[in-house]
Amino acid sequence: MQIQIGFTLIYECPQPTPMILMLSVHSSRSHDMVVPDELKSNPSVPFRNYIDNFGNWCTRLVAPAGELVLTADGVFSDSGEIDPQTPAAQQHPVQDLPDDVLTYLTGSRYCETDLLSETAWQLFGGTPAGWYRVQAICDFVHDHIRFDYQRTRPTMTAKDVYSERTGVCRDFTHLAIAFCRCLNIPARYCSGYLSDVGLPPPYPPQDFAAWFEVYLNGSWHTFDVRNNSPRRGRILMTRGRDAGDVPLSTTFGPNTLKLFEVRCEPY
């Protein structure tokens, strides 16, 4: 199955403004691009790309004063299968975890394990360790947090989400990650495109989505706490400890985002 992906962003800057963008398909999935999602700008500005410590493609540029249009369009080859389900996946003792996984076991900017540890053990300490414990976390967050674009904010943390019981997919994901880490399950934040393939219409406007991965049985497994069901056409763009590691754009100066459009549909 081939999926057409892309976006259009329009920024207005009162002065030349350096930017770092994280808007490309993740380096681990580059081989699945049939048509590369090459970034274009109007007016044309020079770019420089690099890969960060999490394997994310990053693009550096300086936006000129005035309006800058950023677009990308590509075609991605997907298996068409739903997210793999592995209920038998078991949790590792902490002492057996690989060194490079440990960073996903501790607290981070938006996932305060120190503030949620007692709550996590009270809620989920009695569940079977491994896959079923992660699914119990997803069920709880999905059932107890209300999705609301109007009730979130850039500084909202996992503890805030738990207290206020509202948020968007980013916030759902932060709370689930924090609970997992509190229970000694390594968890990392992911974002990217998510198609509506296999779902009945009507379809909401496309947006970038957030989900997470947990380390069980020697490999990483995908969980989507916002939708709480396996999906088709999930295309990874970024990975990190939480959203603080993977902002879509970091701007070093005043600016206004005038347009934000995402495209993800069967090709």
Image (cartoon, rainbow, N blue to C red):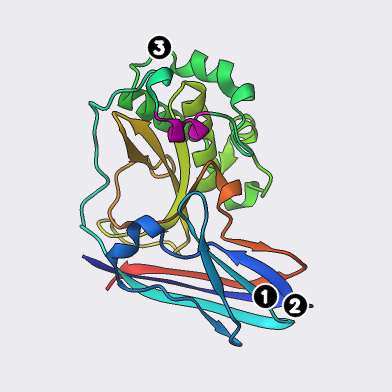
Total labels: the figure holds 3
Earlier sequence position, callout 2 versus callout 1? 2
Corner quadrant of residue 94: top left
Q: Secondary structure at mark 1?
A: strand
Q: Residue 35: horizontal and vertical position, in percent?
A: 32, 75
Query: Is residue 210 inside the magenta stretch?
Result: no
Q: Is residue 52 left or right of residue 222?
A: right
For label 1, the residue is 62
Give residue 200's mark: none
Query: What is the C-alpha distance between the residues marked 1 and 3?
Result: 52 Å
Tell me, yes or no, whether the two marked residues, 2 and 1, touch with CB atoms within 8 Å.
yes
For the record, the magenta segment spans 98-105
* Residue density around tag 2, few if under 14, some if 14–19, many if 20 or more, within 10 Å: some
Disc on res. 16: 2
Where in the figure is residue 143, as x and y percent of width and height?
45, 33
Q: Amino acid at mark 1?
A: Val
Picture coordinates of residue 228, whole percent (x, y): 37, 40
Query: Please, what secondary structure does the residue beneath circle 2 have?
Result: loop
Q: Position of residue 189 (x, y in %)?
A: 48, 43
The amino acid sitting under disc 2 is Pro
Residue 126 circle label = 3
**144 relative position to 62: left or right:** left
Q: Is any atom of residue 143 visible in this view?
A: no
Q: Is residue 51 visible?
A: yes
The residues bearing labels 2 and 3 have C-alpha atoms spaced at a distance of 55 Å
**Residue at x-position 29% and y-position 64%:** 31
Front one among 231 and 187: 187
Q: Amino acid at mark 3?
A: Gly
Assign the N terminus to one quadrant of the image.
bottom left
Quick one: quadrant of the C terminus?
bottom left
